[in-house]
Amino acid sequence: MARAATTSDVFNAVAEPQRREILRLLSSGEQTVTEVTEALGVHQPQASKHLKVLKKVGLVGVRRDGRFRRYRLNAQALKPIHDWVREFERSWSESFDRLDDYLRELQAKDKEEKDEREA
């Protein structure tokens, strides 16, 4: 099966690590392409390409500020990812509950062994 284009949805767009890093940067406020470039240590065309993909799927917005374009995070567009991950929350919680039970068993066993040695 052919892989979907990176601009088809937010899942594909955030599959690229540098795009996730851009989203993290933008979570603290607006950034220009130059600021993104410096923070990531990449060339401007590469940063612009990533920002274009993120903009196309709605993860970032842009506004003109004189001769600059300021990019901002559109956190609402991350909702499909959040909703998808939430589906696994119950599974994770059950796993953690089982781990807690197992740790309590180990602690009880260790306490019993310690008590037997001291007796």
Image (cartoon, helix red, strand yellow):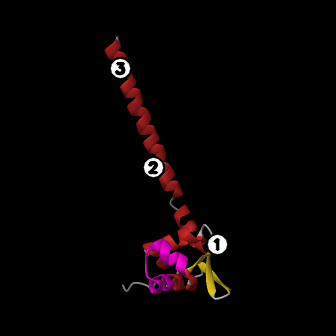
The answer to which of marks 2 and 1 sits earlier in the sequence is 1
Instruction: Give how far across and how far down residue 3 sits, in percent.
Output: 39, 84
Mark 3 vs mark 1: in front = 1
Query: Mark 2, mark 1: which one is toward the viewer?
Result: 1
Callout 2 secondary element: helix
Which residue is the site of mark 1?
76
Mark 1: amino acid: Gln
For this orientation, the residue located farthest to the bottom is: 67
Of the two numbered discs 3 and 2 in the rendering, the one whose residue sits closer to the viewer: 3
Q: Which mark is residue 114?
A: 3
Q: Quadrant of residue 29?
A: bottom right
> Which residue in the structure is indicated by mark 2?
95
Relative to 49, 67 lies left or right: right
Rendered image: mark on residue 42: none
| Residue at 37% in and 27% down | 109
Q: CA distance from mark 2 to mark 1?
A: 29 Å
Question: Which label's residue is closer to the chain start, 3 or 1?
Answer: 1
Question: Where, quadrant-wise, is the N terminus in this rendering?
Answer: bottom left
Across and down, in percent, residue 100 comes to: 46, 40
Numbered marks: total: 3
Instruction: Work out whether residue 15 can be spotted.
Output: no
Do labels 3 and 1 touch, CB within 8 Å?
A: no
Please name the amino acid that badge 2 sits on: Ser
Residue 69: say if magenta.
no
Span of residues in magenta: 34-50
The amino acid sitting under disc 3 is Lys
Our reading of the magenta stretch's main secondary structure is helix
User: In the figure, 63 relative to 84: above or below?
Assistant: below
Location of residue 103 (image quadrant): top left
* Sequence-earlier tag: 3 or 2: 2
